[in-house]
Image (cartoon, helix red, strand yellow):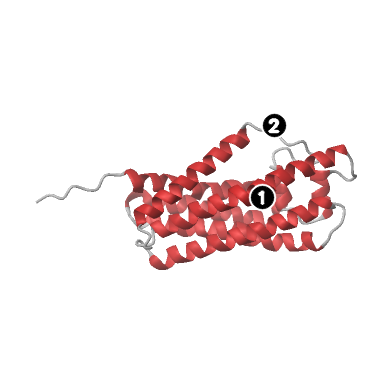
Amino acid sequence: MTVTAKFATRISLIAALLLIAIVAYNLFQPPMTICGNLDPAYQPIIAFELARSVPDLHAIFGDAPGACRQAVTARFAFINTADNYLFIPLYGIFLFFFFRAIRARDEKLARLGAVLILAACLADYVENTCLFAIAANPDVHGGALSLLPWATGVKWMGLAIAGALGGIILSRAGGVRWLIAALCLAGFAAVTLAMIDPHTYGRYASGGVTISWVIFLIADAIFLFRRPAVQMN
């Protein structure tokens, strides 16, 4: 079956809208109670993903077992399970088919973007496997915590590079679309800084990726609903 650009755009847009529904649902959930001294401005799930040491984990889980830690562990288990079954598949479909939809604009870059998305999704599953293992015993620096930076690095940088590539492809239509590339590259820079220094810039990783996702969502809607140009004789 040949996937046309319009069909790919439709699939991408539907997945993006379902992602928005999940985000909207999360906005109405009570904030997570943290047992340690994590900066309130640092999103707990991102801090967990970017944890690199036992002190990083204690900032989230506290430094001793107890009811608070059990509650945090249960909340993370729910988040990561939903991530495995809903969020990863949906963002993977959204982004993979977005690159399929724009492949006619630049076949090589679009193919590379699609491959990076698949790699990021696989890395995300590895990341979640690590997070489940770490949450079971956040007082020990085990193999899962050693593997976590590699999994998160592949995931976040894969998404960031794909975002930059998508921005570059979209910007080639000319006009003020160079701003699209600039915004996506800014998102790439934010994620890169987060990977280099999670303690200082980790809180900006999610926002850096979100920039390109919002642009791609808008592009999907424009591509799908715009009227074709009228040919003049």
Q: Amino acid at mark 1?
A: Tyr
Position of 231 with respect to 48 (left or right) is: left
Label 1: few (<14), some (14–19) or many (≥20) C-alpha neighbours in 10 Å? some
Residue at the image position 45 percent from the left and 66 percent from the top = 111
Q: In front: 64, or 125?
A: 125
Please give the residue where the numbered disc 2 appears in the rendered image. 30
Q: Earlier in the sequence, mark 1 or mark 2?
A: 2
Residue occupying the far left of the picture: 233
Residue occupying the far bottom of the picture: 108
Label 2: few (<14), some (14–19) or many (≥20) C-alpha neighbours in 10 Å? few
Whether residue 54 is visible to the viewer of this picture, yes or no, is yes
Q: In front: 192, or 90?
A: 90
Residue at the image position 55 percent from the left and 55 percent from the top = 188
Position of 140 with respect to 5 (left or right) is: right
The answer for how far apart the CA atoms under marks 1 and 2 are is 25 Å
Q: In front: 23, or 198?
A: 23
As helix, strand or loop, the secondary structure at mark 1 comes to helix
In the displayed structure, would residue 213 be above or below residue 32?
below
Please give the residue where the numbered disc 1 appears in the rendered image. 201
Q: Amino acid at mark 2?
A: Pro
Give how far across and how far down residue 11 sits, in percent: 43, 50
Q: Quadrant of residue 22?
A: top right
Whether residue 152 is visible to the viewer of this picture, yes or no, is no
Position of 13 with respect to 129 (left or right) is: left
As helix, strand or loop, the secondary structure at mark 2 comes to loop
